[in-house]
Structures are given as C-alpha cells and as structure tokens.
Image (cartoon, rainbow, N blue to C red):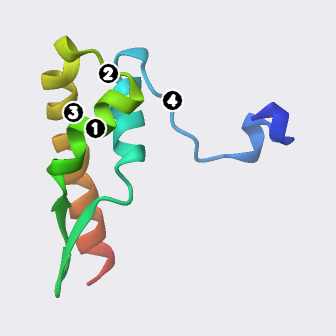
Amino acid sequence: MAALGFALEDFPDHVEILPDNLAAVNVFIAMATQWRVSMGGPIGLDYNALPAVMRLVGVPRAEQSDTFECIRTMEGEALRVMAEQNK
C-alpha cells in the first residue's frame, strides 16, 4: 500500500482480516471473475474453478475443506448484498 502512495487513513472503511481467514479471503478475491449469472443476476460462484484457484493461491490441501466452507459463507453474504442492491 505504501509503495503505491497510500496510507491506511486513505481507506476509512477498511476491514481487518484475521490471519486464520487470510487464505479464504485471498481465494474469494481471486474468484471475483468466476460468478455464475442468470437472467436474475448472480447465482453463485463457479466451483469448477475453485481447486485451481486454491492451488494458485497456495492453500495447503489439508486446509482446503475449511477454506471452502469460508468461501461458501462469503459467497452467501455476497449474494445477499447483491440481491439487496438490485431491489
């Protein structure tokens, strides 16, 4: 952030990520282009891409199941927010 000329104060709505959740957040961000969309809008992430993304992000195999559950939680909340915004 500093290398790009930004300071934490430049982002008043920032969120802290606990170290235990960092891998899941990184995978969720990397999956940003993998939403399945219907006529009514987003319906969920394309799980077919998830194993490759987890490997590329560096999630150890032993942690992939827990990371998947975290992704599903974030996906559900994201879908709820997107649906609310489209009302």
Q: Residue furthest bottom?
A: 39
Identify which residue is drawn at 66% across, 46% down. 12
Closer mark to the observer between disc 3 and disc 1:
1
**Of callouts 4 and 3, the N-terminal one:** 4
Q: Is residue 70 above or below residue 13?
A: above
**58 on left or right of 40:** right
Quarter holding residue 58 = top left
Residue toward you, 19 or 61? 61
**Of callouts 3 and 1, the N-terminal one:** 1
Three-letter amino acid code of the residue under disc 3: Cys
Closer mark to the observer between disc 1 and disc 2:
1
Three-letter amino acid code of the residue under disc 2: Val
Read off the residue under disc 4: 16
Read off the residue under disc 1: 52
Distance of label 4 from label 2 (alpha carbons): 20 Å
Disc 2 and disc 3 in contact, CB within 8 angstroms: no
Q: Residues within 10 Å of mark 1 (few under 14, many from 20)?
A: few
Three-letter amino acid code of the residue under disc 4: Glu
Identify which residue is drawn at 33% across, 75% down. 85
Read off the residue under disc 3: 70
Give SS at disc 2.
loop
Disc 3 and disc 1 in contact, CB within 8 angstroms: no
Read off the residue under disc 2: 59
Distance of label 1 from label 4 (alpha carbons): 26 Å
Three-letter amino acid code of the residue under disc 1: Ala
**Of callouts 2 and 3, the N-terminal one:** 2
